[in-house]
Image (tube, grey):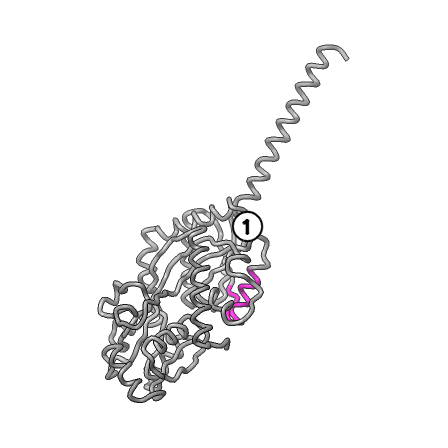
């Protein structure tokens, strides 16, 4: 081969190598980034608090990022049907799971096919909402001390309703142990039917998630006695915390967060966290969250994972010591 032909061949070979390198980089990046369109698996029924928050986030992410976010409701099995479906999804950022306290409570109740920090990667802690012990607005119990005194005078005569084997049930057990009282626990499939029974005069009290009772508290048909929050809820300035009521140092809110199947690429997790974080901070979202009784948090990545790990341990200890059983 002549010298000129050698130069041409060398140039062609170099150009081909450059082309291969350039083509390979976008392909890798495309795999690393979260898909533009993805779905949020919600293991709760439509119109529930988690569902409402998920749809609000989906709508805002669509507006801000031009993405199509699909909500897939998969309720049932104590959130296990949706959780298992999300765990089996491809870890490519195309599927995420909306989680709440049951996600960390369930493993403490019985063996689960998932591990809180091993089967999923944390994306973002979106929002929190308080747990509130409520009685009828016309109730003779104007404070937690009033309720405790009555429960001590008539052991087992007063009743409290909540979803069994839930964070609300755990909060009730904390009060029972901290105040050394005996109240009859009445299980309900959710907070709404428990509140209806309370309003009908067939229960003494209900441990409720704030979004379900915010309207009743504002109208006065229900009265809040205590919250399980670390500090007083701004919208409930007259309702003390467990610590202020001298019950216990325990505190826990209901949390709503997003996780992805384990081994989702870090770049995809970072992109998802950025999208959800930006949606939470959008000015038009703030009043809509407040209307639902939700308080934005925006803790993303490893700190959210550590929060769930710690909470899981706390629930396991309380459930073990109080003898709560899976329903």
Pinpoint residue 289: horizontal percent, then vertical percent.
34, 60
Tell me, yes or no, if residue 13 can be seen here.
Answer: yes
Name the main secondary structure of what is drawn in magenta.
helix
Which residue is rendered at x = 43% and y = 76% of the image?
A: 322
Magenta residues, start to end = 73-86
Which residue is rendered at x = 54% and y = 47% of the image?
A: 265
Between 112 and 12, the residue placed more toward the observer is 112
Between 312 and 284, the residue placed more toward the observer is 312
Which residue is rendered at x = 41% and y = 47% of the image?
A: 64
Q: Is residue 202 left or right of residue 259?
A: left
**Looking at the image, residue 300 lies above or below residue 175:** above
- Where disc 1 sits, the SS reads loop
Where residue 176 sits, quadrant-wise, is bottom left
Where residue 53 sits, quadrant-wise, is bottom left
Crowd band around label 1 with a 10 angstrom C-alpha radius: few (<14), some (14–19), many (20+)? many
**Looking at the image, residue 295 lies above or below residue 191:** above
Q: Is residue 105 left or right of residue 196?
A: right
Between 319 and 93, the residue placed more toward the observer is 319
Mark 1 highlights which residue?
264
Whether residue 76 appears in magenta in the rendering, the answer is yes
Where residue 232 sits, quadrant-wise, is bottom left
Hey, which residue is sitting farthest top in the picture?
A: 3
Pinpoint residue 86: horizontal percent, then vertical percent.
55, 60
Q: How many marks?
A: 1
Pinpoint residue 254: horizontal percent, then vertical percent.
39, 65
Quadrant for the N terminus, please. top right
**Looking at the image, residue 69 lies above or below residue 326:** above
């Amino acid at each position: 081969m002549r010298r000129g032909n050698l130069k041409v061949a060398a140039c062609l070979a170099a150009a081909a190598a450059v082309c291969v390198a350039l083509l390979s980089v976008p392909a890798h990046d495309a795999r690393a980034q979260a898909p533009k369109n993805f779905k949020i698996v919600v293991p709760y029924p439509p119109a529930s608090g988690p569902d409402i928050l998920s749809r609000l986030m989906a709508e805002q992410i669509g507006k801000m990022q031009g993405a199509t976010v699909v909500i897939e409701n998969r309720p049932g099995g104590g959130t296990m049907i949706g959780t298992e479906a999300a765990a089996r999804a491809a870890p490519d950022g195309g599927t995420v799971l909306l989680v709440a306290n049951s996600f960390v409570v369930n493993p403490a109740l019985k063996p689960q096919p998932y591990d809180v920090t091993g089967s999923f990667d944390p994306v973002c802690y979106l929002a929190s909402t308080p747990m509130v012990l409520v009685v009828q607005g016309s109730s003779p119990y104007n404070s937690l001390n009033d309720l405790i005194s009555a429960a001590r005078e008539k052991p087992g005569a007063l009743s409290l309703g909540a979803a069994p084997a839930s964070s609300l049930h755990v909060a009730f057990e904390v009060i029972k142990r901290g105040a050394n009282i005996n109240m009859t626990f009445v299980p309900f499939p959710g907070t709404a039917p428990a509140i209806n029974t309370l309003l009908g005069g067939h229960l003494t009290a209900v441990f409720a998630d704030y979004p379900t009772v915010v309207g009743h508290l504002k109208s006065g048909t229900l009265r809040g006695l205590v919250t399980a929050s670390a500090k007083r809820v701004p919208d409930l300035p007259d309702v003390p915390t467990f610590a202020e009521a001298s019950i216990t140092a325990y505190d826990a809110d209901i949390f709503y967060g997003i996780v992805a199947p384990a081994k989702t690429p870090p770049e995809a997790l970072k992109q998802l966290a950025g999208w959800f974080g930006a949606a939470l901070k959008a000015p038009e979202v703030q009043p809509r969250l407040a209307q639902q009784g939700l308080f934005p948090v925006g803790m993303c990545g490893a700190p959210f994972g550590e929060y769930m790990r710690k909470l899981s341990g706390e629930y396991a200890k309380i459930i073990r010591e109080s003898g709560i059983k899976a329903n």
